[in-house]
Amino acid sequence: MEKVNLQEKLKQIPDYWKPHVVGELNGQMVKLVKFMGPFTWHHHEKEDEMFLVVRGRFRMEFKDHYVELEQGEFLIVPRGVEHRPVAEHEVEVLLFEPGSTLNTGNVRNEFTVENLKRL
């Protein structure tokens, strides 16, 4: 059992849109990721996702609306809901989701990360 310093872990992440695992509990993964620009539209058939803004801000777009998220705020995207995160400036995000969650959900493209690195 060791504590995790989010800022220290985030300093180790050089690339955008590439989540890194920093913890696991009860089949769920705690991941850190940096966003910049638009991601790809996607959904997850079986997994809900939680996005917690550690630093910065971003917009979660849905087909019929969007939600602006600021530092210290989180959003849960239910399974099956089409969504796309967009960050105008660099943002640092903590993800909490099942271990089976592929970052691009039902889509495979240049953003897809099959094997996550652990920090």
Image (spheres, rainbow, N blue to C red):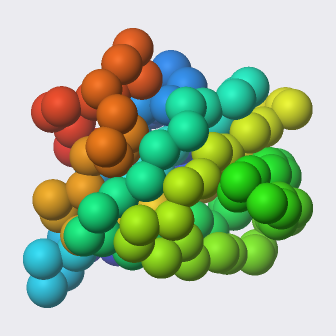
Would you say residue 29 is visible in this rendering?
A: no
Residue 57 percent coordinates (x, y): 83, 52
* 49 in relation to 37, above or below: below
Residue 53 seen in this snapshot: yes
The furthest residue to the front? 64
Question: Nearest the camera: 100 or 7?
Answer: 100
| Quadrant of the frame with the N terminus | bottom left
- Identify the residue at image location x=74%, y=39%: 86
The answer to which of 9 and 46 lies nearer the viewer is: 46
Outermost residue toward the bottom in this view: 26
Is 81 in front, or is 49?
Answer: 81
Q: Residue at x 54, y 71 (%)?
A: 77
Name the spot of residue 94 as percent of width and height, x first. Answer: 52, 60
Q: Is residue 106 above or below residue 50?
A: above
Q: Is residue 46 left or right of residue 57?
A: left
**Tag count in the figure?**
0
Q: Residue at x 76, y 74 (%)?
A: 72
- Locate residue 72 relative to residue 82 in the image: left or right: right
33 left or right of 45? right
Look at the picture and state if 10 lies above or below 59.
above
Residue at the limit of the structure toward the top, as seen here: 110
Of residues 72 and 36, which is closer to you in this image?
A: 36
The x, y position of residue 80, in whole percent, is 41, 67
